[in-house]
Amino acid sequence: MPNTEFGITQVKLALVTGHATRDKRFRFTSLHHLLNKDFLRGCFHSLDKKKAVGIDGVTWEDYSKELEGKLDRLVQKIGRRAYKPLPSKRVYIPKNESEKRPLGISSVETKIVESAVARILRSIYEADFLPCSYGFRPGQSSHDAVNALDKAIMFSPVNHIVEADIKGFFDNVSHERLMEFLRIRIGDTAMLELIGKFLKAGFIDQGEFNGTDKGTPQGSILSPLLSNVFLHYTLDIWFENTVRTHVSGYVQLVRYADDFVIAVQYQDDARRIEKAVKSRFAKYGLEIHAGKSRNMSFGKYEKQNAITQERKANTFDFLGFTHFCDKTRSGKFKLGHKTQRKKFIKTSKNMWEWLKAIRNLVKAEDWWKTLRAKLLGHFNYYGISGNYPDIKRFYDKTLKMTRYWMNRRSQKKNLTVEKFRNYLQWHPLPKPEIKHAIYAY
């Protein structure tokens, strides 16, 4: 029977958060015992039942059979410090036209323990994480990060942007450095040992085992939190304690996971920050991508400066949007946002390929719900203030592609534009809509 309250452990986690909030130097020496049966059962029931299976082929439904006995054995292994997570199953998803992104799929049992450890760590580190960090945190989103950036540029004396791309961040995080950071707050050797096992679990790729001596596997439940801990110490705290105290004017960091930009007032500060960021990450074994990192003039006077200097006004990409200098109807400066070109091309291509593949497999009314969901998902992410033209363009393009492939179901191309419009009257699709009103100043 699901334990939706996570038992008494939930109360204890609240106490952990209280200690972490009151005393930023407090080290937690007793965390491992929180991994009890009730807590693990609750973590099991919180997992997505439809997720892909790991290397053991065990589904959520499979594991649910004789669950109590499996949890008893799991708790015993954890208590004896004999638990060893299975390697993840390596799969690849498209990153761009020429690259693929590796993902690790954990087994159900591994996910249970990962989820439990992540909840325990979150109860500590949510008290530590700074407001500039938005990725993979409860109550925070990429739109909150874009909104914070918008407000910084609109209402502060920002004249320059420093953007940086960490080369292969998730694949290159130093395990030794990460464990050093964890030991700042955690003194429980059993918990640290368990986290180390997850980091060293490795993965199976095309039937072969690959060990891992660095990196936090993408796709793991625990990975986002561990990555945030690493960047909290390497970037966020360093920025607050060092960068802020060594600049002449305004400066603000906005970070979502490993993607970040820094808004700066003065050019000299921007140049020094760009150089310092490279040195800072090199210290921790990470490299800033030379071709994807720069400092540039940007802000209220960028358009006028570009005209004077006979060049195009600078823009930059962040979280799937291209940010540019725009004007309100009254001629005042505002920060513009539009769908990043390569993201628009990619989502359009994915829609084309999906329509091409699905149109003959099942009847239109059967895949129409999925089409609705795809459109709605696009609007939910890209529907921010100022970006209506691009989401409308995606909507129009999707309708055109849909009609094209519906006509290709047979050699009779009889679905005219008028007939398709009538079809949409009876089977409506979501209309483009602004979902995130970040211009509500």
Image (spheres, grey):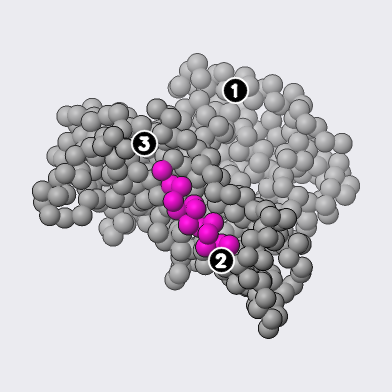
> Of callouts 1 and 2, which one flags the residue occurring earlier in the amino acid sequence?
1
Q: Where does residue 26 sit, x and y in percent of width and height? A: 49, 22
How many numbered marks, from 0 up?
3
**Left or right relative to 330: residue 49:** right
Mark 1 and mark 3: span between their CA atoms?
35 Å
Dot 3: what SS? helix
Mark 3 and mark 2: span between their CA atoms?
33 Å
Mark 2 neighbour density, 10 Å: few (under 14) some (14–19) many (20 or more):
few
Dot 1: what SS? helix
Q: Where does residue 372 sit, x and y in percent of width and height? A: 66, 54
Q: Which quarter of the image is occupied by the N terminus?
A: top right
Residue on which the image places disc 1: 16
Dot 2: what SS? helix
Q: Which quarter of the image is occupied by the C terminus?
A: top left
Residue on which the image places disc 2: 400
**Left or right relative to 181: residue 206:** right
> Of callouts 1 and 3, which one flags the residue occurring earlier in the amino acid sequence?
1
Query: Residue at left 51%, top 42%?
Result: 434
Mark 1 or 3, closer to the camera? 3
Residue 150: assigned label: 3
Quadrant housing residue 222: top right
**Left or right relative to 42: residue 383:** left
Is the stretch drawn in magenta largely helix, strand or loop?
helix
Mark 1 and mark 2: span between their CA atoms?
55 Å
**Is 15 part of what is drawn in magenta?**
no
Mark 3 neighbour density, 10 Å: few (under 14) some (14–19) many (20 or more):
some
Residue 293 visible to an observer of this rendering:
yes
Mark 1 or 2, closer to the camera? 2
Report the front residue among 302 and 157: 302
With respect to residue 54, does 226 lie above or below? above
